[in-house]
Image (cartoon, rainbow, N blue to C red):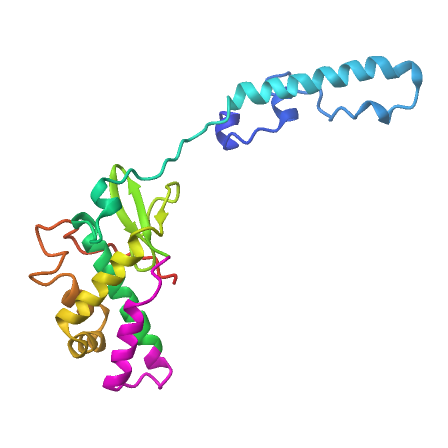
Amino acid sequence: MDVAASAGCRCVGRASALAGRPRGVYSRPVPPPWRFRHRGRMQPVLAVWLALSLLAGTGAQDMCGEPSTRSISAPQLSPEERLSPHMPESLRCDACHAIAFQIEEQLRRAEGKVGRKALSESDYVEVLERSCSQGWESYGVQELDGEKRLAGPGLPRQEPMTVMVTGGPWPGRLSKMCHGYVGEQGEAQIYGAHRRGPAALRELLCHGDKGPCAGGKAGGPSPPKALQNEL
C-alpha cells in the first residue's frame, strides 16, 4: 500500500525517513544527542542524529510533495447584480425560497408563544411586517461551477470552499421582494398557506403560475431537500 496515500499525505518525518530501509535497521527511534552523557560519543552521535533529521524532512517532502494551494475568489457580479435595486432574475427563485422560509419561521415562533394556536389577524399582520423588515444580513451570493446562487438560511447548502458576498444590495432586495409578496398576496392568504404547511406557502409565493420558480423560469426546479436551517 502506498504510504502517502494510506496516511492521507499527513507524513511523519521519522517514518518517511525510515521507509524503504531493510527491516531491523533503525527499528528503534534515535534519541536526541543530549541523551548521551559521554563526551567521547557526543560528536558522532550528533552527526548521525542531524543526518537522520535531514533525511526525515527530505523523505516527507518526497512522499507528500509540495502543499497544494487553492485560490478562492469572490463571485464576479455584473453591473445589474451590483447596482440594480431589484433582485436579478436569475436569483429570484432562491430569494423567494429564502423569504418563504423566514416568514414560516417567524409565524411558527409567534404561534409557539400562544400554544401553537392560530394567531389573530393583528398578530399575524405584525409578524409578517417584522419578517419583511428584518436585516437579511445572513444572506449573500456564492458562485459554484460558474453559476451564481443565493445562499443562507432555508436555501440549499453550497460548496464550503467558496466565498459568499453578503451585505451590499442583497438585504434591501430581499426586504423589497418580501413586502411585494405580502402586498400582492395579502396577509390573510399568506397566513392561510402557512397554516397548511411550508410546502403550501412556497407553492403560493414561488411556484404558482406567476412565481419566480415556475417552470421555464430561472431557478424553476424545486429546492433540494438539504437545507440550511440555521437562522
Quarter location, residue 36 = top right
How many labels were placed on the picture? 0
Q: Is residue 56 left or right of residue 229?
A: right
Q: Position of residue 98 (x, y in %)?
A: 27, 60
In the image, what residue occupies the spot 67% across and 17% down? 54
Question: Visible in this render: residue 88?
Answer: yes
Q: Position of residue 33 (x, y in %)?
A: 82, 22
The C terminus lies in quadrant = bottom left
In the image, what residue occupies the spot 93% across and 17% down? 39
Q: Position of residue 20 (x, y in %)?
A: 59, 17
Quarter location, residue 46 = top right
Question: Visible in this render: residue 226?
Answer: no
75 magenta-colored: no
Q: Which residues are magenta?
A: 110-137
In the image, what residue occupies the spot 54% across and 18% down? 62
Q: Between residue 132 and residue 7, name the one nearer to us.
A: 132
124 magenta-colored: yes
Q: Position of residue 107 (x, y in %)?
A: 30, 75
Q: Is residue 213 left or right of residue 101?
A: left
Quarter location, residue 131 = bottom left
Q: Is 19 rendered above or below residue 160?
A: above
Q: Is 22 rendered above or below residue 183?
A: above
Q: Is 35 rendered above or below residue 101?
A: above
